[in-house]
Image (tube, coloured by chain):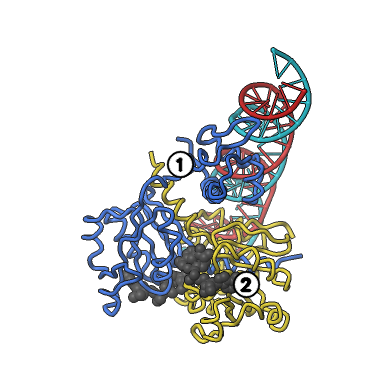
Chain colours: A yellow, B blue, C cyan, D red
Amino acid sequence: MKRIADSTVRRLSIYLRFLEEFEGRGLATVSSDELARRGGTTSAQVRKDLSFFGSFGKRGLGYSVPELATALREILGLGREWRVVIVGAGKIGAALAQYRGFKQRGFTIVAAYDTNPDKVGGRLDGIEIRDIARLERDVAADHPDIAVLAIPAEGAQAVLDRLVYAGIKAVLNFAPMSLHAPSDVTVKTVNMAMELEGLSFALTNRE
Amino acid sequence: MKRIADSTVRRLSIYLRFLEEFEGRGLATVSSDELARRGGTTSAQVRKDLSFFGSFGKRGLGYSVPELATALREILGLGREWRVVIVGAGKIGAALAQYRGFKQRGFTIVAAYDTNPDKVGGRLDGIEIRDIARLERDVAADHPDIAVLAIPAEGAQAVLDRLVYAGIKAVLNFAPMSLHAPSDVTVKTVNMAMELEGLSFALTNRE
DNA sequence: ACTAGCTTGTGAAGGAATTCACAAGCCCCG
DNA sequence: CGGGGCTTGTGAATTCCTTCACAAGCTAGT
Ligand SMILES: NC(=O)c1ccc[n+]([C@@H]2O[C@H](COP(=O)([O-])OP(=O)(O)OC[C@H]3O[C@@H](n4cnc5c(N)ncnc54)[C@H](O)[C@@H]3O)[C@@H](O)[C@H]2O)c1
Ligand SMILES: NC(=O)c1ccc[n+]([C@@H]2O[C@H](COP(=O)([O-])OP(=O)(O)OC[C@H]3O[C@@H](n4cnc5c(N)ncnc54)[C@H](O)[C@@H]3O)[C@@H](O)[C@H]2O)c1
């Protein structure tokens, strides 16, 4: 398959969110123009994004809301449950563990891991906090699909290496640092400090 | 000034992080190649990024670590304190309020706002939780520079409109939705569901 | 002072993503 | 059943970003 740009996948995710809203309101069809307006892009962009995967619309009419939503869920791989583990039961790990938005989209958090003996054995919103020493054994047994890294930057690369070795192929990283992994492992980093610095830059360099 | 790409600003932020690490270790100079290796990019990219702002290196030698760090802090607008308010004292708002990484970089959280009367009047790690009704008055008095939006998606656009009206020019949004604001207001959205869906896509569409 | 060895800074080339623009196709209405 | 009015799907054009490639310039060593 032709390589799909990251930005395209992100926009598909946005379109899906609007489609679900429209589905809830019982709308039957939507035009690329409408999706674009809501999503902050252009209608040509919407159509181009979709065209990589097939043709889903009817000329003169637009897209069937439920059909396009189904197609997008299929494309994004949301037709199944994804099993997620969280490493680091700190403040951000706890917020994520309790976040309802994940479950809603088919991402089930199966366990959390931590090094702190005071935390191990406890629970986060019903999710067991386990000793990180069990990581490899548990991954071999449970086959989680995705790991969320929510530990301090210092330990992040070492834990990532362990996750990779254990067979995890997708990681969402909250530690503010660049991580290195083999090319068959997808790592996405959410770096809030970086976003704030982007705002600082924008405020500083407006002419 | 020439328009600077978002991706460039993000990389500057990454370079600065490494420079600060090098500063701590007392290294005097660093080459574009070294920065590139650490930051997961190429040396040409590093030099091009810097070239938009001036020339900071010495041919044959590389960049002076403290000088380049200072220059980047200047470029990113980190030479001053930025005053931040958090709207939404929920799980993610609380995690952010207690996050040390912000203060470290000169982002000071001056207040949090919420609608919930049970929360208003309380504190988050020393930060006052105020009634959202006071938002406009407080902004006029305190002049915060940046607002962080950590409330459910439904209310986000309405609160953003109030923030814009009150004069805020930069917003970091955690609600999973596209927000619309005038062009002189910079809004950055951190959408974790979208990132997870990017991972789902990657796992589904590997050949 | 000169040379060997690096590394920067930057035009030019190349590649990727977005926007343009329009033919093709569908629906509705008369 | 044919025409008007829309909207899609997509090559071509454009814009934006990255990579290439090399002259210019610095340092250290002799
Ligand atoms: N709190 C935030 O709002 C926020 C925002 C952006 C980024 N981050 C980043 O997220 C990460 C976590 O931040 P936090 O605020 O939740 O910190 P925290 O100190 O509250 O939590 C970190 C947790 O990780 C555990 N831990 C440490 N090393 C570990 C290891 N090797 N294996 C397993 N567990 C380990 C600790 O015991 C602790 O429970 C940091 O990298 C931070 O920079 C946090
Ligand atoms: N928790 C997470 O890990 C996480 C992750 C990603 C995104 N988010 C997003 O962040 C936002 C907040 O999530 P959360 O988990 O912290 O939710 P939460 O329910 O814990 O907190 C929301 C807080 O906002 C307050 N609030 C609601 N409407 C308000 C308004 N109009 N003005 C001021 N305050 C208001 C509520 O009283 C509550 O205290 C949501 O949009 C969520 O989708 C959360």
Q: Residue at x 64, y 56 (%)?
A: A5
> Which residue is more in the foreground, A67 or B108?
B108
Distance from disc 2 to disc 1, alpha carbons, whole Å, reads 35 Å
Front position in the image: B165 or B140 = B140
Give the position of the N terminus of chain A as an image quadrant.
bottom right
Please state the chain letter of the residue tagged with numbered disc 2 in the rendered image.
A
> Which residue is drawn at the image coordinates 26% and 56% (left, top)?
B166
How far across and down, in percent of the image, does residue B88 sit? 35, 70
**Residues at marks 2 and 1 on the same chain:** no
* Chain letter for mark 1: B
* Closer to us: B169 or A131: A131
Say whether residue A182 is left or right of residue D1. Answer: right
* Mark 1: secondary structure: helix
**On screen, A52 above or below A125?**
above
The image quadrant of residue A47 is bottom right
Residue visible at 47% across and 55% down in the picture = A195
A125 lies left or right of A131: left
Label 2: few (<14), some or many (≥20) within 10 Å? many
Name the disc covering residue B75, or none.
Answer: 1
Residue A31: x percent and y percent?
52, 62
Ligand 2: give its quadrant.
bottom left
Quadrant in which the C terminus of chain A is drawn: top left
Label 2 SS: strand
> How many other residues sit within 10 Å of disc 1, few (<14), some (14-19) or many (≥20)?
some
Residue B121, image x, y percentages:
25, 74
Q: Is residue A30 visible?
A: no
Tell me the kind of residue under disc 2: Ala
Residue receiving disc 2: A147
Hey, what amino acid is under mark 1? Ile
Q: Is residue B159 visible?
A: yes
In this rendering, the answer to whether D19 lies above or below A58 is: above
Q: Is mark 1 within 8 Å of ligand 1?
A: no
